[in-house]
Image: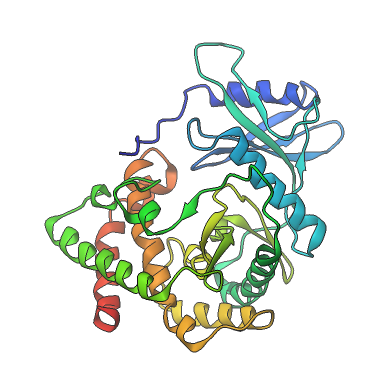
Amino acid sequence: MVAVFNPVTDVDGIARQALECYGLPERCRLRMVNHSENTTYRVDDPVSGERLILRVHRPGYHTREAIDSELAWLNTLRRDTDVVTAEPIPGSDGRLVQYSKSAAGGEEGRYCVLFTFLEGSHPSEEALVPAFERLGEVTAKLHAHARGFDVPEGFVRPRWDYEAMLGDTSLWGRWQEGPRMTPASLEVLGTLARTILRRLEAFGDSPEQFGLIHADLRLDNLIMRGREVCVIDFDDAGFGWWLYDLGAALSFIEDREDIDELVAAWVRGYRTQHPLTRDEVDEIPTFIMLRRLLLVAWLGTHADTQIAKSLSGHFTSVSGTLAERYLVRYG
């Protein structure tokens, strides 16, 4: 059973103390920009004008070895491809992953990572179609690199298979305990889960379908600079189905009226770099619903986050409606 996410009360203090690990001046200002799986801050030096991003990790989620592995892949991507992403910055001791505790004491410490700041903005509602076409192209480049990545000894990242997402040992909790779950929701989502499992087993997990992926390419993790799509936050990177990266990109917006147009744009962009078969394209809705059901579980174990508070009232019932539409074709 996955424990409910319960952040420490003095994460601000932990972030402030982490600045010392990187030799940053006390005058730096901290502003929380996101609280989800981890807590992220923008660091501003009012004198030099330098901006950085500090990620404070959730305790008990990733080991130091797993975070080091994430950053090893990230740095290899930066070296070997033209994919734009933030650069991790080493601390004063030369290590990319630091451990910080609040000066006030009384709280367990957390792992922290400092990154360069990427100027830009998240994709706008008015320009999602061209953004998804560009994202498809960038995702294919990530996958091409992953296919040739020589996984080093000691590389530790999660395996995002069915059991890890929707099984009894789900990494994000049980979907059955999602917010406002009703008997009707349990029934239709249970049918959805069984159908997804059956189709994934038929689809397979050979290297042609399965490998090292970002696993969280949702809109909050994309930075637009003109037509350029920059990718951030590889914290969930692990081994999963290539097409799951598209499902993750559609997180929380699976019920949009233009969802088919977004998928088609992503496929067009992807195919500029790597082929997709008709069977693969036909199976995309399975990966969209796989992610959707995983998010039902995530909302149930992360009720304190702002996104959970804003969505939990209707997310499960809408997921049931989406499941019914999916099952008409795939059930």
Residue at the left extreme of this rendering:
183
Q: Residue at x 63, y 27 (%)?
A: 15
Q: Residue furthest bottom?
A: 278
The front one of 321 and 82 is 82
Left or right: 285 in relation to 24: left
Residue shown at 42% from the left, 69% from the top: 287
Residue nearest the observer in this picture, 320 or 76:
76
Query: Going 47% across and 23% down the picture, which residue do you hit?
Result: 9
Q: Residue furthest front?
A: 153
Instruction: Count every numbered label the image shows and give the total.
Output: 0
Q: Can residue 32 be seen by looking at this rendering?
A: no
Q: Position of residue 207 (x, y in %)?
A: 56, 69
Q: Position of residue 42 (x, y in %)?
A: 68, 38
Q: How is the image coloured?
A: rainbow
Residue 246 vs 72, above or below: the answer is below
The C terminus: image quadrant: bottom left
Which of the 4 image quadrants contains residue 163?
bottom left
Is 46 situated above or below 13? Answer: below
In the rendered image, the quadrant that contains the N terminus is top left
- Residue 284: image location, x then y, percent: 44, 76
Q: Nearer the viewer, residue 188 or 52?
A: 188
Residue 165 on image: x %, y %: 38, 54
- Where residue 259 sits, quadrant-wise, is bottom left
Visible residue check, residue 279: yes
Q: Is residue 36 above or below residue 267?
A: above
The residue at 23%/51% (across/down) is: 176
- 140 or 156, which is in the foreground? 156
Residue 242 sits in which quadrant?
A: bottom right
